[in-house]
Amino acid sequence: MFLSVLWTVVTTREYAPDAMAAFDSPAEQDAGDGNTLAGRGYGASAAWLAAGALVVWAVGQFGLEKEVYLLGALLLGYGLSSAVAIALAKAGRRPTC
């Protein structure tokens, strides 16, 4: 394991801060102001919620392993948190994490 870490340290290039900033896209630089989130619609959130509901329904309908409920719950949670974040951004409030 030590040799793996040593190999990574020796072969990895380092870039100057201005060179690293050149790799960022303009969309990533503007992402911190919240306007991007406020401009989004609820379509993607609804899709995540529908996917989570579909997974939960499929587990009950087809007798799948109960652990798959976790996947459905995570999809539902992501869709819900996404919708809440968009609603807060549209209302002019920044979501805090």
Image: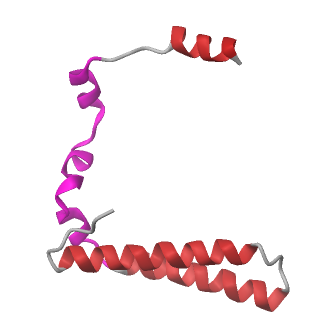
Q: In this view, does 71 lie to the left or right of 24?
A: right
Q: Give the percent coordinates (x, y) of residue 10.
A: 53, 8
Position of residue 40 relative to residue 18, above or below, is: below
Which quarter of the figure has residue 93? bottom left
Q: Give the percent coordinates (x, y) of residue 79.
A: 46, 76
Q: Give the percent coordinates (x, y) of residue 76.
A: 54, 79
Residue in the image at 34% along x and 79% along y: 84
Residue 34 drawn in magenta: yes
What's the magenta bit mostly, secondary-structure-wise?
helix
Residue sitting nearer the eye, 10 or 46: 10
Q: Is residue 23 left or right of residue 72?
A: left
Position of residue 30 relative to residue 87, above or below, is: above
Q: What stretch is highlighted in magenta?
A: 16-41
Residue in the image at 74% along x and 85% along y: 58
Which quarter of the figure has residue 55? bottom right
On-image quarter of the C terminus: bottom left
> How many numbered marks have been drawn onto this rendered protein structure?
0
